[in-house]
Image: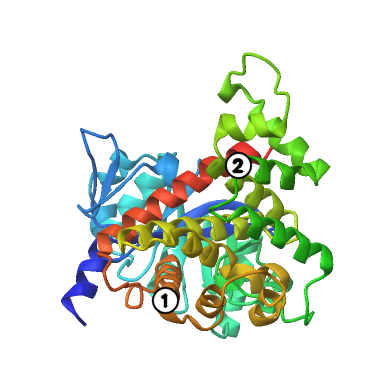
Amino acid sequence: MSARIDSARNSSFTRRPVFSKTLDVIAYELVLGDGPVTSVAVDPATGKLVLNDVVHLDFGEIGDGKLVQLTVKPSFLESELPTQLGAANATLVLGPGVDDSPSVVSSLEYLHAIGYRIWLDDLAANPALRHLARFAHGIKVNFSHEISPSLEKQLGIMKSAGTELIADRIESYDELRGATHHGFTKFQGTFLSRPDAFRKTRAPAAQIAALELITLLQDPEADINDIADVIRRDVSLSYRILKVVNSAQYSLQRPLGSIEEAVMLVGTKQIVEWVGMMSMSGLNDKPSELTRVAMVRARVCETLAERLGRQDTQRFHVAGLFSVIEALLDVPADKALQDLPLSTEIVDAIVSCGGTMGEVLQGVVAYEEGDWERAHIIGVTDDALASAFETATIETDRAWSRISGA
């Protein structure tokens, strides 16, 4: 392993959503590049929590107001650190290296008493955790592995006692349905960014029209009148945009007289992002988190293109945005993209990771999935990638909160 990869693991982090049966995000698991949490401190200058001495995070922002799950080491459990972190901020996940030693048991008794929610991770791979089941509010099961009869029996007993079950490593919608059939009520994995099989060879015309609208708005040469004209064609979209702009945040002195005024007030970049979110989230019944993933990728790709000194940063944004098209439409990417007015470079980046744009997109997706050994982009430092991901995640969450009620 190269020194570069070791460095990346020290400073990198990503978040993995935890889904309910209705595929709403109910929590985020925070995954650090260098493994489980061993230390937590508070940065006096910023008030952020500092994990493992290098990762500075505002839990309220990075968790979007939801509980954050942290995998921790025994040394963390046995220290004063959990008290500094606070039971209201995090769920503690017990994984490799945690055993039933007297000091760990004593620490868990205390943490359980002060309100911490505790999860056990992968009993099949970490059998010592079975002795800590009495402290567990939930259990994560690696669904990609076969569940033995003895483990299935134990899970059934714990479920009857009120312990929640998370099916982890779900990689397809077929596996998701299988986990639901087995009684799991919470889910994690990469299934969100995968198609639900290829049920269609082409996207319906209505979906293509919506994607064409998004593509048109990504044109850096589009002016206010062009953007306003596109929005006006869709009454529902016009209503939602005006509703968001009319919120208390903008403190309007008088009613808006036109879509053009709304665009001028908020700015073309912000309006385009809102329209993209609204249009993509309305294409089908996929979880809204998929739209959020697309917007984060788009922001990160654009930021990294700027760092690389590229002049066509908006094209990188488009590549990130449409990188979820297979999962969004359940249509092969090459088939879906051929109906859109996108450049060959963008299509090649999405379909086959070709060119610099494809390398950036591949690195961003690898980072998002916590695949640290592939999450490297020539010309971009690992700290810059981590910073771009954090900024994009927080800014996308804020934008989503503004439009979700519109």
Q: Earlier in the sequence, mark 1 or mark 2?
A: 1
243 vs 308, left or right, is right
Q: Observer-nearest residue: 109 or 378? A: 378
Q: Observer-nearest residue: 52 or 254? A: 254
Disc ID at residue 127 = 1
Can residue 116 be seen at all in this image of the molecule?
A: no
Q: Observer-nearest residue: 312 or 19? A: 312
Disc ID at residue 271 = 2
Residue type beneath disc 2 = Ile
Residue type beneath disc 1 = Pro
346 vs 8, left or right, is right
- For the residues labelled 1 and 2, the Cα–Cα distance comes to 52 Å
* Image: 380 above or below 331: above
* Image: 217 above or below 166: above
Residue 197, x across and y down, in percent:
72, 81
10 Å crowding of disc 1: few (<14), some (14-19), many (20+): some
Residue 144, x across and y down, in percent:
55, 81
Can residue 29 be seen at all in this image of the molecule?
A: yes
389 vs 182, left or right, is left
